[in-house]
Image: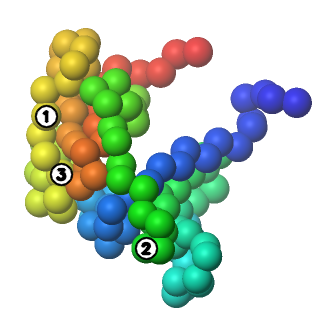
Amino acid sequence: MINAQTRVRIARPSRDLAAAERFYVEGLGLDVLWRTAEHVPGEHDLLMLGLPGGPWHFELTHDPERPVEPAPTVDDLFVLYLGEPVDKALVRRMLAAGGTHVTPNNPYWDEHGVTVADPDGYQLVLCSRGWSA
């Protein structure tokens, strides 16, 4: 049964797991929860990111034998509801770690936060608003 404690995994392809790791770990501050130790032929290389004990993780995949080109659209967003103003030092770290400041397709996100594209072009929104269910 699906409920508020249901675990969530968000997965998508990456061109370069090392670049993605720099962005999400050094830039954003997530932890590496798990990664493949070495490539196994016929399997994907995996990088799982998140916060220890959290009910979700973010998984990036790469298959060097059959690479999938990331194809983000302007509405493929990973939104983090901070509930406080976006820390400018955090944004600077994300940019230094390979992110690019972008103008979101929906002006709502500029009104209430900052949008940064990761090295694969997917947009991460740091929203200053809180989440209310």
Disc with the residue nearer the chain's start (2 vs 1) = 2
**Does residue 124 appear anywhere in the picture?**
no
Instruction: Name the amino acid type tagged 1.
Output: Val
Residue sitting at the far front: 66
Q: SS of the residue at dot 3? A: loop
Picture disc at residue 102: 1
Q: Say which of 61 and 79 sits in front.
A: 61
Q: Is residue 5 left or right of residue 114?
A: right
Q: Quarter of the image for the C terminus: give it.
A: top right
Distance from disc 1 to disc 3, alpha carbons, whole Å, reads 9 Å
Picture disc at residue 121: none
Displayed quadrant of residue 75: top left
Q: SS of the residue at dot 1? A: loop
Assess whether mark 1 and mark 2 are in contact (beta carbons under 8 angstroms): no
In this view, 113 is above or below 10: above
Residue visible at 42% across and 63% down in the picture: 67
Tell which tag, 3 or 2, sits nearer the viewer.
2
Instruction: Name the amino acid type tagged 2.
Output: Pro
Displayed quadrant of residue 114: top left
Residue visible at 36% across and 49% down in the picture: 70
Distance from disc 3 to disc 2, alpha carbons, whole Å, reads 23 Å
Q: Is residue 86 left or right of residue 88?
A: right
Q: Which residue is mark 2?
A: 64
Instruction: Name the amino acid type tagged 3.
Output: Gly
Q: Which residue is mark 3?
A: 99
